[in-house]
Image: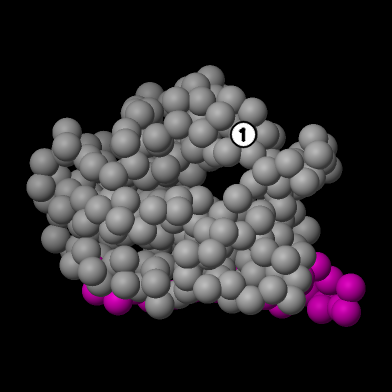
Amino acid sequence: MASDDPLDWDTTAAAGAYRDRDMRLAERLIFPAVLQRLGRSPGPDRLVLDVGCGTGAIAAQLAGGGEWTVQALDPSAYMLDFARADRPHPRISYRLFDGRTLPWLADNSVDGAVCGLVYCTDPDDDRLAALTAEIHRVLRPGAPYLLADLNPAATGVGFSTLRHGEPGAVYCDGDTVPALLRLRDGTPMTSVTHYRSLDRYRSFLTGAGFPSPTVDLPTLRVEAPAEDDPAETRTAPYMILTTHA
């Protein structure tokens, strides 16, 4: 696949490539942190949303390691087809939604929500604001919302499995940013993301009624740091924002 041929996320080709992406950094930096902050489900009826579930990687972690009942939602039918095929689980229900509304869920009916690497792929601030407000509406008072996304302070940094943004470039809120992802076979895939500052992420949350989030910037730990260690040992590729309804 040509590295200079960006893919639209909502296509069969993009879903297939996303299915084959190298997830080692996400598995080591995002998944454990999300499970730790969300905690284990204290009962079989505890419901968590995986909003923008893609091919189901986080949903599988929530249902397996966290023992939650999961509604895994995505606006791409292609992503959901792969999720259902690759990660079926008796506690996961995969559902297509419009990326903005959750009309089948009652107010204060959900015990937690996770959204991983979604805001950076959506160019529409109004849609994201509406989605964030809907997540706040359906969460029980005090229920956690974990938003994991690309670290806006790390644009242009070449990590071992990804780079979002060109080296040396400066981006402003709303700018389109090229994202270079590595697939499991080493092939590069270029897609499109959308830059938003940390303050913009905070404004989505506080504008929806959430308290200002705590911010975690996980890096990869090494026993004996060296100059040739990968960038993720020094700079966080991702950020994890934690707040509560």
Give the residue number, with chain letter if any, for mark 1: 14
- Could you say where residue 169 lies in the image, as x and y percent from the top left? 69, 73
Tell me which amino acid carries mark 1.
Ala
Q: Between 35 and 145, which is closer to the camera in this rendering?
A: 145
* Along the line of sight, the residue nearer the viewer: 118 or 88: 118
Residue 222 falls within the magenta-colored stretch: yes
- When asked about the image quadrant of residue 187, the answer is top right
Q: Quadrant of the C terminus?
A: bottom left
Q: Magenta residues?
A: 210-235
Q: Residue at x 14, y 45 (%)?
A: 109
At horizontal 25% and vertical 71% (from top left) the residue drawn is 206
Q: Position of residue 197 (x, y in %)?
A: 48, 73
Looking at the image, residue 229 lies above or below residue 145? below
Pick the front one: 224 or 220: 220
Question: Percent from the top left, x then y, of residue 31?
Answer: 53, 53
Q: Magenta region, mostly helix, strand or loop?
A: loop
Residue at 47% x, 64% y is 174
Left or right: where 75 falls relative to 245: right
